[in-house]
Amino acid sequence: MGGHTQRSRQSARSIRSWIAPVGILLIAGLLIALVILQMRPDAASDAGEPATDGITVVPDGLPDLTQFEYRDADDVQAAGPVDAPVGLVVYSDYQCPFCAKWAQSTLPRMMEYADAGDLRIEWRDINMYGAPSERASLAAHAAGLQGEYWAFHDALYPDGEIRTEAELSAEALTGLAEQMGLDVDRFSSDMASEEVKQIVAERAHEARTIGVTGTPSFLLDGRPLVGAQPTDVFIDAVENALTEADR
């Protein structure tokens, strides 16, 4: 785990260094504006205008948001090839009911693109609901170190619902790992390790730094999307991005 942890730390540090402070403020302002805009689809905004596919058009002149894609072969919270032509970063929380619904309804379709080699999916937890969310993130990452991140992730959203706080206790999460046949001793050790805690904390901090204050939020091919929008919105966005990548 040491090599993975070192690379993850370096990845987080390098990502923060890519964007100057002014650029971060611009991105944060944009994402906040997008939250307001997409909550009020009939309202105009200086941050952009609603496009016909329901995606807010991002104005020119901002830093390239694809730089927030890690594209790290050792990232256990990712699916799809590192060199896939399109990237999707998902900012989520294990106590967010809209995240659970999106994970059930839309994520499987996105996984089809990842399995086909067309999409790189990178999952980030922002833990906005406190300790239970953070424990779930630690547990999911620990499961990922045994190659079972996505199976554990799905188990944390059973039938598109969130688990109760009691079901996100350390004991309950360890019990879930045991049910899934994971090495429980290794799972418990990884979940409690300072290395995994730092990875989870750095990713949550990075998301807040760029203005992610609500879940689910997304960067799809470097374009912000906010909220659990219909599956067709994401399919159209991926198809459009693949078309642009082929040009």
Image: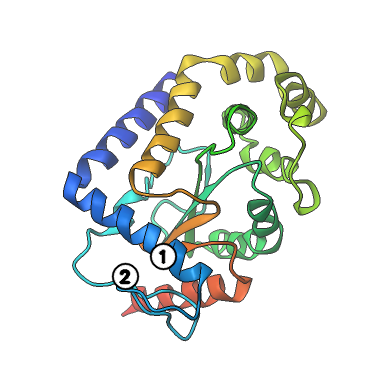
Rendering coords of residue 139 (x, y %)? 63, 28
Front position in the image: 31 or 9: 31
Whether residue 143 sits left or right of residue 213 in the image: it is right
* Above-or-below relation of 109 to 195: below
Q: Residue at x 38, y 47 (%)?
A: 71
* Above-or-below relation of 199 to 45: above
Location of residue 189 by image quarter: top right
* Above-or-below relation of 69 to 231: above
Residue 1 visible? The answer is no
Q: Please report whichever mark, 1 or 2, sits nearer to the chain's N-terminal start.
A: 1
Residue 103 visible? The answer is yes
Under tag 2, what secondary structure?
loop
Q: Residue at x 60, y 27 (%)?
A: 131
Under tag 1, what secondary structure?
helix
The reply to whether dot 1 and dot 2 touch (C-beta < 8 Å) is: yes
Rendering coords of residue 192 (x, y %)? 57, 15
Location of residue 143 by image quarter: top right
Front position in the image: 87 or 165: 165
Location of residue 180 by image quarter: top right
Near mark 1 (Cα within 10 A), the count class, few <14, some 14-19 or many ≥20, is many
Amino acid type, residue under disc 1 in the picture: Leu
Residue wearing tag 1: 34
Residue wearing tag 2: 47
| Distance from Cα at disc 1 to Cα at disc 2 | 7 Å
Near mark 2 (Cα within 10 A), the count class, few <14, some 14-19 or many ≥20, is some
* Above-or-below relation of 11 to 53: above
Q: Can you name the residue that lies furthest to the bottom here?
A: 52
Amino acid type, residue under disc 2 in the picture: Ala
Rendering coords of residue 232 (x, y %)? 60, 76
Rendering coords of residue 34 (x, y %)? 41, 65
Whether residue 163 sits left or right of residue 245 in the image: it is right
Q: Residue at x 48, y 30 (%)?
A: 200
